[in-house]
Amino acid sequence: MEPNIRNIAVLTSGGDAPGMNACIRAVVRTGIYHGRNMFGVMQGYQGLIDNNINEMTARSVSNILHMGGTVLKTARCLAFKEDAGMEIAFKNLQDRHIDGLIVIGGDGTFTGAKRFGEKYGINVIGIPGTIDNDLYGSDFTLGYDTAVNTIIDAIDKIRDTADSHDRLFFIEVMGRDSGCLALRTAIASGAEAVLLPEKETSLKQLITKLKSGVTTKKSSSIVIVSEGNKYGGAYDIAKSVKRKFTHYDTKVTILGHLQRGGSPSGFDRILGSRLGYAAVNAIIKGESMQMVGLRGNEIKLTSLEEALHAHNYKLEDDLLEMTHVLSI
Ligand SMILES: Nc1ncnc2c1ncn2[C@@H]1O[C@H](COP(=O)(O)OP(=O)(O)OP(=O)(O)O)[C@@H](O)[C@H]1O
Ligand SMILES: O=P(O)(O)OC[C@H]1O[C@](O)(CO)[C@@H](O)[C@@H]1O
Ligand SMILES: [Mg+2]
């Protein structure tokens, strides 16, 4: 028999990601369609602790589908990592008889959700929402596609000026521990090299690659540096390369937080809608401690535990090898 989950809360946590609003809309409307009471928690886990929780209607989520950011706001909440913070959060949910919690966020958010669900037995479903694409069990996380397109657009513009001036550009992209954005945008922008947190490329290898570009008469070169790269960020790498390789005038661009903003792509609007709809259907059926994700073209459940073991699996060796081959 299905458990009678009546009151469901939704929150967004960690870095915002384009498509979160489409997802919130889908969660709220699917819940209301099924006769549930729906609540929006402001500022991620911080709102659970501060009791910043509001009942939502179908109209609360009108005209947000196309918007970047998150109308529920988000936060990196240190207090939720402490037992005392979790306890207050649980009490606030209990007081409102909230028996289902849907969290939209990345690996940190899921780590918190898993601890919370295990400790208090509340039904929890995770929705992968992060530009980092660093969760196992979903080919893509919400916001990743938009961020990839935003980065490509920026690199295309840099390529114009790099080529006009015969310059070497080091472009730093986000992804604290994940090289997904860096690798995929390197392919899509035709970068000469890419430095990732997960795979080591020595300075020597990088310089050899850049020198071969000079030999084959490349007028400009672009190196994508993932922010989590072991040898440092784009400024550090540029400085080290400049000391040993003086052929090009060298410039650095840090793309920064513009990568997280903007109206979601069509793909992220559809993905957010599908994941939000599936999350509510799953929680109503009594599923808990699971993530809803896209695999192939199907929405599948993966345990939160498994979802957190993503490292390396999304950086297929052939893609790295391919960037090398295609940029000769
Ligand atoms: N071990 C933990 N226990 C409880 N809560 C946690 C834990 N780790 C993270 N959280 C909560 O999850 C929040 C979000 O985590 P984090 O800042 O790592 O972002 P994320 O969800 O990984 O998203 P993104 O990487 O896209 O920014 C943290 O601010 C904290 O409130
Ligand atoms: O916005 P903040 O808190 O500086 O966080 C930046 C981090 O968030 C992410 O953008 C993920 O949301 C990472 O790629 C990046 O390292
Ligand atoms: Mg994360």
Image: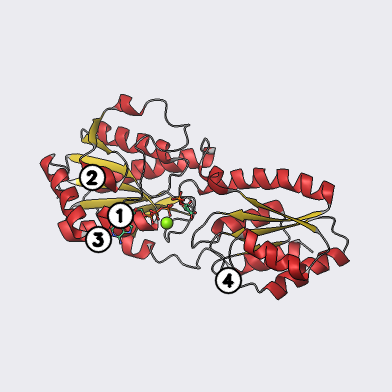
Where residue 107 sits: x, y (%)? 38, 58
Which residue in the structure is indicated by mark 4?
Answer: 199
Identify the amino acid type marked 1.
Leu
Residue 284 visible, this orientation = no
Q: Earlier in the sequence, mark 2 or mark 4?
A: 2
Q: Which mark is residue 48?
A: 2
What is the spatial separation of the Cα atoms under label 2 and label 4, in whole angstroms? 38 Å
**Eye-nearest disc, 1 or 4:** 1
What is the spatial separation of the Cα atoms under label 1 and label 2, in whole angstroms? 13 Å
Identify the amino acid type marked 2.
Leu
Q: Is residue 132 above or below residue 201?
A: above
Marks 1 & 2, CB-CB < 8 Å contact: no
Who's the residue at 65% across and 62% down the image? 194
Label 1: state its secondary structure: helix
Q: Earlier in the sequence, mark 1 or mark 2?
A: 2
What is the spatial separation of the Cα atoms under label 3 and label 1, in whole angstroms? 14 Å
In terms of depth relative to the viewer, which is nearer, 316 or 257?
A: 257
Identify the amino acid type marked 4.
Lys
**Eye-nearest disc, 3 or 1:** 1
Where residue 207 sits: x, y (%)? 75, 70
Who's the residue at 26% across and 42% down the image? 47
Where residue 86 sits: x, y (%)? 20, 54
Q: Quadrant of the C terminus?
A: bottom right
Which residue in the structure is indicated by mark 1?
Answer: 78
